[in-house]
Image (cartoon, rainbow, N blue to C red):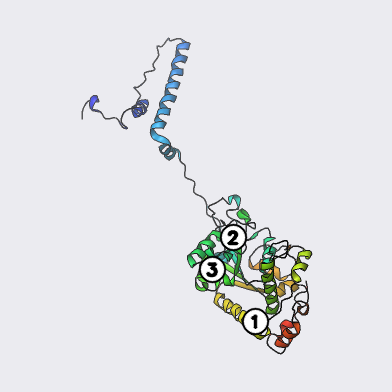
Amino acid sequence: MGGAKGEERPGGGGGDDWCYQFGNKNTFDLKAPKKSPLALRMFVFAMTMLCGISICSMCMKQLGSDGWSRIVKIEVVEQPCNKSTVPPSEVQFVHYPQPITYSREECKCNPVRFFAIISSQRSGSGWFETLLNSHTNVSSNGEIFSKKERRSNISSIVKTLDKVYNLDWNSSASKNECTAAVGFKWMLNQGLVENHVDVVDYFNQRGVSAIFLFRRNLLRQLVSQLANNHDRYLKQLNGTHKAHVHTKHEARILARYKPRLNTTSLIWQLKQADEYTRDALENLKSTRHITVYYEDLILNRTKLFDVLDFLKVPSRKLVSRHVKIHIKPLSEQIQNWDEVYSALNGTQYESFLNAADYII
């Protein structure tokens, strides 16, 4: 009820009055005389257009950018990736990560598998990882838990794992958008053994597959560890320590060192190393895994295809620039070889004395 004076216009005064008036058919009476000249009609038309543009501009300013975006926003709903081709038994291990640091673009529906190379120092894991990284669809990001802060507690471990498996971890091996298998190298003594219960839960929940890589000949592994520790302090290659080398010249320099083994504690050392590995395998066996040995890979390169099949990536020839350091028989690499031979001969570790896994 009430007259025109009492009518309340929406939006208040100022520019909103203009917006309101613009929609009022009585605001502009553009009726021209029936016999008005053409020039006058064109002038009126031009003025009408200018006024319309001006009023629209004022309305947009009143609405603000947020209000305008709400008007013109068209919501785009992305279609989920088609998983119907994945066998039911494999669904848990097939992932479609959505990185926050970049877009996978046309590869967003390329399935990705998660893996971890679980090993111990001087077991050939560095060489093995470079072989995997030579595959165009595999990204293995190195020994990420070598830094103590990343393995200080299970929360730090999980945070690091999530970053790797979300494809947000940046390393020289990262192939980002179109990778089909992503993982890293994890040494047993880098928080893995201490947190194995939580790690197994994480692996099983996230669908992470484990590649167990170990060395059969623990005596050769011990020699390699002692030689590596020796170079860590002496830095024989131009003042730098190198755990892995790319030339035969560098390999010969590092191989000159012949450690002297403590035969009194040697059997105990080998037993400890053996039990440590066996216990780790037992604690982690409930994960989806494959077990490979360094010696088997050296003597039969087709074993690598078993690993590629395990990761469900195409079979390809894998290459590495790593050059093996210790290529001689153990009798030429241990300073007190006769004592070592006597200590192990006739024991459960006798087979380590004559193993020819150094042949490439």
167 left or right, relative to 8? right
Secondary structure, mark 1, is: helix
**For numbered disc 3, what is the local secondary structure?**
helix
Disc 3 vs disc 1: which is toward the camera? 1
Give how far across and how far down residue 8 sits, in percent: 26, 30
Which of the numbered marks, if any, corresponds to residue 203? 3
Which sits in the foreground, 29 or 143? Answer: 143
Q: As displayed, is residue 329 above or below residue 35?
A: below
Q: Secondary structure at mark 2?
A: loop
Q: Left or right: where does residue 42 sit relative to residue 292?
A: left
Residue 84 place in picture, x, y as percent: 56, 60
Amino acid type of the residue tagged 1 in the rendering: Leu
Amino acid of disc 3: Phe
C-beta proximity under 8 Å, tags 2 and 3: no
Q: Residue at x 68, y 74 (%)?
A: 226
Marks 2 and 1 sit apart, C-alpha to C-alpha, by 39 Å
Q: How many marks?
A: 3
Residue that mark 2 sits on: 112
Q: Nearer the viewer, residue 302 or 324?
A: 324
